[in-house]
Amino acid sequence: MVKLDTLGRRSRFERSPTGKRMRLTPRDQEILSWLYRYRYLRHDHLIRIFDPKSPKRFAERLGDLFHETGFINRPLLQAPLFDARATPMMYEISNKGAAYLEALELLPHRAVTFSRRPRDSFNPQMLHTIMIIESLLEAELATRSELDQRFVPVDEILARAPEATRKARNPLALPVRIDGRKTQLIPDALYGIEYQINGESRYRFHALECERTSPTYRSGTATSSTRKKQAAYAAAIQAQAFKACWGIPNLEVKIIGHD
């Protein structure tokens, strides 16, 4: 039996299939692919990516992928903050959806390393996670309007990294020595931009750090921590630790949200 809310609509966060027969299209597969790559994408993110001719029908299709196929989820963690009039719905690919892509050999390179986790694994703090996703998505979408540029996701970078890095518990951990002490940096994300120059490929790689700071809880300690992180990256770049760790020729640090 289909579960309806007080306005006669299907539940937003609980699947209510009607038995509608669905044939998945290449665009449906592409939606699943983007969700696999980023794990979480809001409705407005997907609108930017696909620029559908009919946003209403696109929203209905997302609803069908949630209710009828079970290939995408509407994460419950957004429910307490969800306002139907003001908050875009957030989606993620389900295990069933990922298995569907895998069976078709359509799993793409991930843009974030937290895009596929076991159910009982640590869930990143959501506002920070979305900040990372939006920063990466902005970088990727910017390359789509440039004929000579291509976004290079983290999985593609790590696929070419040294074997020790690929087998490491956290391949993003970058060893660095500061004041004679060994430590490590773990960026929020790692990505690259490929540029075509005179028919040849050139690359710039970026370690992304997202700092959620506001006057409400900004402190001298937080500022100091960011400065220490910047100093650590400077030491790692000077020592060219990124070459041995990730096998990339250069690295720039991009800090988002810090004054």
Image: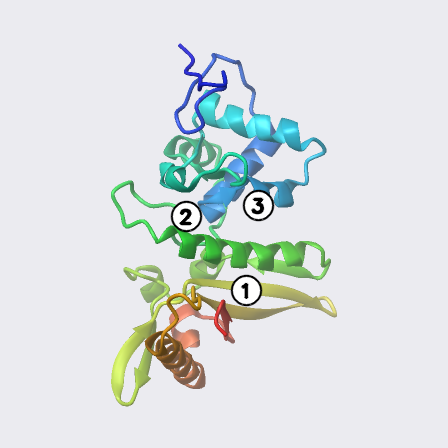
The tag on residue 178 is: none
The residue pinned by badge 3 equals 45
**Residue 142 position within the rendered picture, expressed as x and y whole percent measured from the top left:** 65, 58
Q: Are marks 3 and 1 in contact (CB under 8 Å)?
A: no
Badge 3 or badge 2: first in the primary sequence: 3
Q: Are marks 1 and 2 in contact (CB under 8 Å)?
A: no
**Residue 66 position within the rendered picture, expressed as x and y whole percent measured from the top left:** 47, 27
Badge 1 or badge 2: first in the primary sequence: 2
**Residue 9 position within the rendered picture, expressed as x and y whole percent measured from the top left:** 50, 19
The residue pinned by badge 1 equals 192
Residue drawn at x 62%, y 45% as measured from the top left: 49
Q: Helix or strand or loop: what does disc 3 sit on? A: helix
Residue drawn at x 38%, y 45% as measured from the top left: 116
- Foreground mark, 1 or 2, reads 2
Q: How dense is the environment of label 2, judged by Cα within 10 Å: few (below 14), some, or many (20 and up)?
A: some
Report the amino acid beneath label 3: His
Distance Cα–Cα, label 1 vs label 2 = 18 Å
Q: Give the quadrant of residue 73.
A: top left
Q: How dense is the environment of label 3, judged by Cα within 10 Å: few (below 14), some, or many (20 and up)?
A: some
In the image, 181 versus 249, the foreground residue is: 181
Q: Helix or strand or loop: what does disc 2 sit on? A: loop
The residue pinned by badge 2 equals 115
Q: Quadrant of the N terminus?
A: top left
- Report the side of 154 relative to 138 (left or right): left
Report the amino acid beneath label 1: Gly
Residue drawn at x 50%, y 27% as measured from the top left: 65
**Residue 89 position within the rendered picture, expressed as x and y whole percent measured from the top left:** 50, 37
Q: Residue furthest front?
A: 216
Distance Cα–Cα, label 3 vs label 1 = 21 Å
